Amino acid sequence: MKLKIINPAVGISQEQIKAWQQYLSEFLLPDTILEFENIPSGFPALENKTQDIINGAEVLKIVARAQEESVQGIFINCFNDPAVLAAREFSDIPVLGPYEPSVLFASMLADRLAVISTDQYGLLSEGRKVYEYKTADRIYKIMNVNLSVLQLSNHKLLLNRLIECCRELEQEQVGAAVLGCTGMCSMIESLKAALHENGIHIQVIEPLKAGVTSLEYMVRMGYSNRIYGAKIGAFPD
Protein backbone atom coordinates (compact mmCIF):
# COMPACT_ATOMS: atom_id res chain seq x y z
CA MET A 1 0.00 0.00 0.00
CA LYS A 2 1.23 3.48 -0.85
CA LEU A 3 -0.09 6.53 0.99
CA LYS A 4 0.57 10.05 -0.26
CA ILE A 5 1.09 12.63 2.47
CA ILE A 6 0.59 16.17 1.22
CA ASN A 7 2.32 18.89 3.22
CA PRO A 8 0.07 21.95 2.68
CA ALA A 9 2.69 24.49 3.79
CA VAL A 10 5.76 25.60 1.88
CA GLY A 11 9.31 25.28 3.16
CA ILE A 12 9.04 21.80 4.68
CA SER A 13 12.60 20.45 4.66
CA GLN A 14 13.71 16.99 3.62
CA GLU A 15 15.10 16.60 7.13
CA GLN A 16 11.63 17.17 8.58
CA ILE A 17 10.05 14.76 6.10
CA LYS A 18 12.60 12.10 7.00
CA ALA A 19 11.82 12.59 10.70
CA TRP A 20 8.07 12.22 10.06
CA GLN A 21 8.67 9.11 7.97
CA GLN A 22 10.77 7.51 10.68
CA TYR A 23 8.24 8.44 13.36
CA LEU A 24 5.24 7.06 11.46
CA SER A 25 6.94 3.86 10.30
CA GLU A 26 6.86 2.53 13.87
CA PHE A 27 3.05 2.43 13.80
CA LEU A 28 2.34 1.28 10.23
CA LEU A 29 2.42 -2.20 8.75
CA PRO A 30 5.69 -3.17 7.02
CA ASP A 31 4.24 -3.06 3.50
CA THR A 32 2.85 0.48 3.85
CA ILE A 33 4.89 3.02 1.87
CA LEU A 34 4.70 6.75 2.60
CA GLU A 35 5.21 9.23 -0.23
CA PHE A 36 5.48 12.88 0.83
CA GLU A 37 4.79 15.82 -1.46
CA ASN A 38 5.04 19.53 -0.67
CA ILE A 39 2.87 22.17 -2.29
CA PRO A 40 4.92 24.36 -4.68
CA SER A 41 3.70 27.76 -3.46
CA GLY A 42 1.76 29.37 -0.65
CA PHE A 43 2.18 30.28 3.01
CA PRO A 44 4.75 28.62 5.32
CA ALA A 45 2.05 27.85 7.91
CA LEU A 46 -1.74 27.53 7.97
CA GLU A 47 -3.25 29.42 10.87
CA ASN A 48 -6.39 31.01 9.41
CA LYS A 49 -9.00 30.57 6.67
CA THR A 50 -7.16 32.81 4.20
CA GLN A 51 -4.07 30.61 4.36
CA ASP A 52 -6.21 27.46 4.30
CA ILE A 53 -7.96 28.52 1.08
CA ILE A 54 -4.88 29.74 -0.80
CA ASN A 55 -2.71 26.76 0.14
CA GLY A 56 -5.69 24.43 -0.14
CA ALA A 57 -6.00 25.22 -3.85
CA GLU A 58 -2.48 23.84 -4.34
CA VAL A 59 -3.40 20.78 -2.29
CA LEU A 60 -6.39 20.06 -4.54
CA LYS A 61 -4.20 20.12 -7.65
CA ILE A 62 -1.98 17.45 -6.09
CA VAL A 63 -5.03 15.39 -5.11
CA ALA A 64 -6.32 15.62 -8.69
CA ARG A 65 -2.99 14.41 -10.12
CA ALA A 66 -2.86 11.60 -7.57
CA GLN A 67 -5.97 10.04 -9.14
CA GLU A 68 -3.68 8.84 -11.95
CA GLU A 69 -0.89 7.69 -9.64
CA SER A 70 -0.37 4.38 -7.87
CA VAL A 71 -1.44 5.59 -4.43
CA GLN A 72 -4.24 4.11 -2.36
CA GLY A 73 -4.76 6.85 0.23
CA ILE A 74 -4.14 10.59 0.62
CA PHE A 75 -3.40 12.37 3.89
CA ILE A 76 -3.39 16.19 4.15
CA ASN A 77 -0.91 17.00 6.88
CA CYS A 78 -2.45 19.91 8.80
CA PHE A 79 -4.81 19.92 11.78
CA ASN A 80 -6.97 22.53 10.03
CA ASP A 81 -7.87 19.80 7.49
CA PRO A 82 -7.41 22.26 4.59
CA ALA A 83 -9.23 21.16 1.43
CA VAL A 84 -10.14 17.75 2.88
CA LEU A 85 -13.88 18.07 2.27
CA ALA A 86 -13.29 19.61 -1.17
CA ALA A 87 -10.93 16.77 -2.12
CA ARG A 88 -13.52 14.19 -1.11
CA GLU A 89 -15.94 15.67 -3.66
CA PHE A 90 -13.90 14.27 -6.55
CA SER A 91 -11.28 11.85 -5.22
CA ASP A 92 -11.88 8.15 -5.71
CA ILE A 93 -8.92 7.65 -3.38
CA PRO A 94 -9.73 8.01 0.35
CA VAL A 95 -8.68 11.40 1.74
CA LEU A 96 -8.19 12.19 5.43
CA GLY A 97 -6.72 14.98 7.50
CA PRO A 98 -5.64 14.80 11.15
CA TYR A 99 -8.56 16.56 12.85
CA GLU A 100 -11.50 14.22 12.51
CA PRO A 101 -9.69 10.89 13.12
CA SER A 102 -7.91 12.17 16.23
CA VAL A 103 -11.04 13.70 17.79
CA LEU A 104 -13.12 10.60 17.06
CA PHE A 105 -10.39 8.39 18.52
CA ALA A 106 -10.17 10.57 21.63
CA SER A 107 -13.93 10.22 22.09
CA MET A 108 -13.42 6.48 22.59
CA LEU A 109 -11.02 7.16 25.45
CA ALA A 110 -12.87 9.71 27.56
CA ASP A 111 -16.17 11.50 28.10
CA ARG A 112 -14.60 14.95 28.32
CA LEU A 113 -12.20 15.91 25.53
CA ALA A 114 -10.02 18.92 24.86
CA VAL A 115 -7.98 20.32 22.00
CA ILE A 116 -4.70 22.09 22.75
CA SER A 117 -4.20 24.56 19.92
CA THR A 118 -1.35 26.87 18.97
CA ASP A 119 -2.06 30.57 19.55
CA GLN A 120 -4.98 32.84 20.37
CA TYR A 121 -6.42 32.75 16.85
CA GLY A 122 -6.19 28.98 17.00
CA LEU A 123 -8.93 29.09 19.64
CA LEU A 124 -11.24 30.75 17.13
CA SER A 125 -10.33 28.29 14.38
CA GLU A 126 -10.97 25.31 16.65
CA GLY A 127 -14.26 26.84 17.74
CA ARG A 128 -15.40 26.92 14.12
CA LYS A 129 -14.37 23.33 13.46
CA VAL A 130 -16.43 21.86 16.27
CA TYR A 131 -19.55 22.96 14.37
CA GLU A 132 -18.23 22.13 10.90
CA TYR A 133 -17.38 18.58 11.98
CA LYS A 134 -20.23 18.26 14.49
CA THR A 135 -17.86 17.61 17.40
CA ALA A 136 -19.22 20.35 19.68
CA ASP A 137 -20.87 17.79 21.96
CA ARG A 138 -17.57 15.90 22.32
CA ILE A 139 -15.08 18.69 22.97
CA TYR A 140 -15.38 20.16 26.46
CA LYS A 141 -12.59 22.73 26.23
CA ILE A 142 -10.16 24.32 23.77
CA MET A 143 -6.86 25.66 25.10
CA ASN A 144 -3.72 27.04 23.49
CA VAL A 145 0.02 27.13 24.16
CA ASN A 146 0.26 30.75 22.95
CA LEU A 147 2.79 29.87 20.23
CA SER A 148 2.42 30.22 16.48
CA VAL A 149 3.05 27.20 14.26
CA LEU A 150 6.50 28.52 13.35
CA GLN A 151 7.36 28.94 17.05
CA LEU A 152 6.70 25.29 17.91
CA SER A 153 10.36 24.49 17.28
CA ASN A 154 11.06 25.96 20.74
CA HIS A 155 10.66 22.51 22.25
CA LYS A 156 11.44 23.40 25.86
CA LEU A 157 8.87 26.20 25.96
CA LEU A 158 6.31 24.10 24.10
CA LEU A 159 6.75 21.16 26.46
CA ASN A 160 6.30 23.33 29.55
CA ARG A 161 3.14 24.90 28.18
CA LEU A 162 1.69 21.54 27.15
CA ILE A 163 2.30 20.20 30.65
CA GLU A 164 0.52 23.17 32.20
CA CYS A 165 -2.43 22.77 29.82
CA CYS A 166 -2.70 19.08 30.68
CA ARG A 167 -2.47 19.81 34.40
CA GLU A 168 -5.33 22.30 34.17
CA LEU A 169 -7.43 19.99 32.00
CA GLU A 170 -7.07 17.08 34.41
CA GLN A 171 -8.27 19.29 37.25
CA GLU A 172 -11.43 19.80 35.18
CA GLN A 173 -11.79 16.03 34.72
CA VAL A 174 -10.87 16.06 31.04
CA GLY A 175 -9.72 12.54 30.22
CA ALA A 176 -8.19 12.99 26.76
CA ALA A 177 -6.55 15.90 24.94
CA VAL A 178 -5.78 16.17 21.24
CA LEU A 179 -2.71 18.15 20.18
CA GLY A 180 -3.95 20.83 17.79
CA CYS A 181 -1.08 20.78 15.30
CA THR A 182 0.80 17.94 13.62
CA GLY A 183 3.93 20.04 14.15
CA MET A 184 3.74 19.03 17.82
CA CYS A 185 4.35 15.35 17.02
CA SER A 186 8.03 15.52 17.95
CA MET A 187 7.00 16.33 21.53
CA ILE A 188 4.62 13.44 22.19
CA GLU A 189 7.05 11.04 23.87
CA SER A 190 8.65 13.76 25.99
CA LEU A 191 5.19 14.98 26.96
CA LYS A 192 3.98 11.52 27.96
CA ALA A 193 7.10 11.00 30.08
CA ALA A 194 6.71 14.41 31.76
CA LEU A 195 3.04 13.80 32.50
CA HIS A 196 3.89 10.46 34.08
CA GLU A 197 6.61 12.05 36.21
CA ASN A 198 4.17 14.73 37.38
CA GLY A 199 1.37 12.28 38.16
CA ILE A 200 -0.90 13.67 35.43
CA HIS A 201 -3.05 10.91 33.96
CA ILE A 202 -4.73 12.63 31.00
CA GLN A 203 -4.29 10.74 27.71
CA VAL A 204 -2.82 12.76 24.83
CA ILE A 205 -3.60 12.01 21.18
CA GLU A 206 -1.05 12.99 18.57
CA PRO A 207 -3.01 13.78 15.36
CA LEU A 208 -0.40 12.90 12.72
CA LYS A 209 -0.16 9.33 13.98
CA ALA A 210 -3.92 9.06 14.58
CA GLY A 211 -4.71 10.36 11.11
CA VAL A 212 -2.25 8.33 9.05
CA THR A 213 -2.98 5.06 10.87
CA SER A 214 -6.72 5.70 10.39
CA LEU A 215 -6.15 6.21 6.67
CA GLU A 216 -4.13 2.99 6.47
CA TYR A 217 -6.94 1.09 8.19
CA MET A 218 -9.58 2.65 5.91
CA VAL A 219 -7.66 1.56 2.82
CA ARG A 220 -7.02 -1.96 4.13
CA MET A 221 -10.71 -2.38 4.92
CA GLY A 222 -11.60 -1.32 1.38
CA TYR A 223 -13.63 1.76 2.27
CA SER A 224 -14.02 5.05 0.41
CA ASN A 225 -15.05 8.42 1.84
CA ARG A 226 -15.86 10.14 -1.44
CA ILE A 227 -18.78 12.58 -1.34
CA TYR A 228 -20.86 11.90 -4.45
CA GLY A 229 -23.03 14.38 -6.33
CA ALA A 230 -20.67 17.32 -6.86
CA LYS A 231 -20.12 18.31 -10.51
CA ILE A 232 -16.54 19.56 -10.58
CA GLY A 233 -15.56 19.57 -14.25
CA ALA A 234 -12.00 19.73 -15.55
CA PHE A 235 -9.41 21.34 -13.30
CA PRO A 236 -8.11 24.68 -14.66
CA ASP A 237 -4.40 24.94 -15.44
Image (spheres, rainbow, N blue to C red):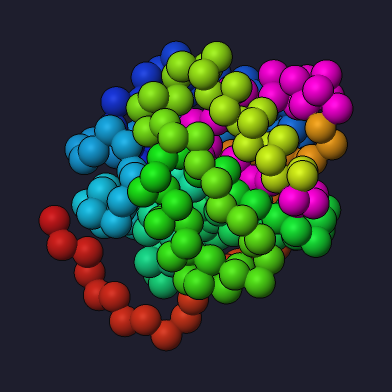
Residue 21 drawn at (x, y percent): 57, 25
Image quadrant containing the C terminus: bottom left
Residue 226 visible, this angle: no
Front one among 116 and 94: 116
Q: Is residue 234 above or below residue 117?
A: below
Front one among 202 and 40: 202
Image quadrant containing the N terminus: top right
Magenta segment: does it hold 34? no
Is 178 on the left or on the right of 57, as rendered? right
Q: Quadrant of residue 195?
A: top right
**Residue positioned 50% across, 41% down in the render:** 144
Q: Is residue 4 above or below residue 106?
A: above
**Residue positioned 64% across, 31% down in the render:** 164
Is 45 on the left or on the right of 216, as rendered? left
Q: Quadrant of residue 193?
A: top right
Residue 43 visible, this angle: yes
Point out the residue furthest to the bottom here: 229
Magenta segment: does it hold 173? yes
Q: Is residue 72 above or below residue 86?
A: above
**Residue positioned 53% across, 66% down in the render:** 130
Residue 17 drawn at (x, y percent): 47, 23
Magenta stretch, residue numbers: 172-199
Q: Quadrant of residue 147?
A: top left
Residue 26 drawn at (x, y percent): 73, 26
